[in-house]
Each structure stands twice: as C-alpha cells, then as structure tokens.
Amino acid sequence: MTEEQFLRAAQEFLGERLGEEAREVNADTELVESGIMDSLLVLEFFFFLENLTGTAIKPEAATVEGLSTLRNAYQLVVAA
C-alpha cells in the first residue's frame, strides 16, 4: 500500500467519524494533541490499521507518537 492510498483510506475513516472536521486533517496534522482524536477514536483507529493491513500491530508499537499523525501511522502499517 502506498502512502497516498493509506492517506485516502485514513481520511475516509476519519470522515465517517468526524464529518466536516476531518477535512482539516492532512498527513502531518497532530491528531491527539489537537483534540481531533479522543481515546476511543484512537482505539478505533488502531483497529482500523490492523484491518487495513490484515495483521496484528504490536501493541508496544502503537504509542501516542506512532499514532500522532497519519504519516506516523503509515509507518506502523508498512512495518506490520
């Protein structure tokens, strides 16, 4: 999966949950610190990443930093 494909899928995921607010999200938007993602959405996003890759992501890899931006999350996906 390319980064562009991942970004489209992730933005669609966020759009379904956040509506118009998701339009402001780009690859480097701080998702947690900005308040866009709360703890429940972070968990949903983690499961989205696992479903996207078809494999389990090691829980120790899913740090706040690893999920802080879509670009960082993509690194989790390619490492899975």
Image (tube, rainbow, N blue to C red):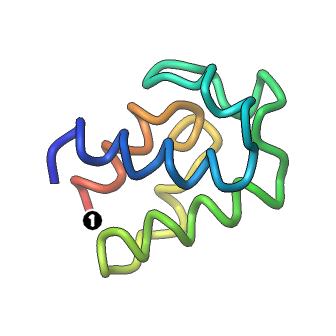
Q: Is residue 16 above or below residue 38?
A: below
- Residue 49 image point, x, y percent: 45, 63
- Residue occupying the point 23% across, 36% down: 4
Q: Quadrant of residue 13?
A: bottom right
- Residue occupying the point 78% across, 22% down: 34
Q: Quadrant of the C terminus?
A: bottom left
Left or right of residue 44: residue 76: left
Q: Quadrant of the N terminus?
A: bottom left
Nearest the camera: 35 or 5?
5
Element marked by disc 1? loop
Instruction: Name the amino acid type tagged 1.
Output: Ala
Left or right of residue 41: residue 25: left
- Mark 1 surroundings within 10 Å by alpha-carbon count, few (fewer than 14), some (14 through 19), many (20 or more): some
- Residue occupying the point 50% across, 49% down: 12
Q: Quadrant of residue 53?
A: bottom left
- Residue 15 image point, x, y percent: 62, 45
Q: Quadrant of residue 44?
A: bottom right
Q: Is residue 60 above or below residue 14?
A: below
Residue occupying the far left of the picture = 2
Nearest the camera: 26 or 66?
26
- Residue occupying the point 23% across, 38% down: 3
> Can you identify the residue that label 1 sits on?
80
- Residue 35 image point, x, y percent: 83, 30
Q: Is residue 65 above or below residue 25?
A: below
Q: Is residue 60 above or below residue 75?
A: below
Left or right of residue 48: residue 43: right
Q: How many marks?
A: 1
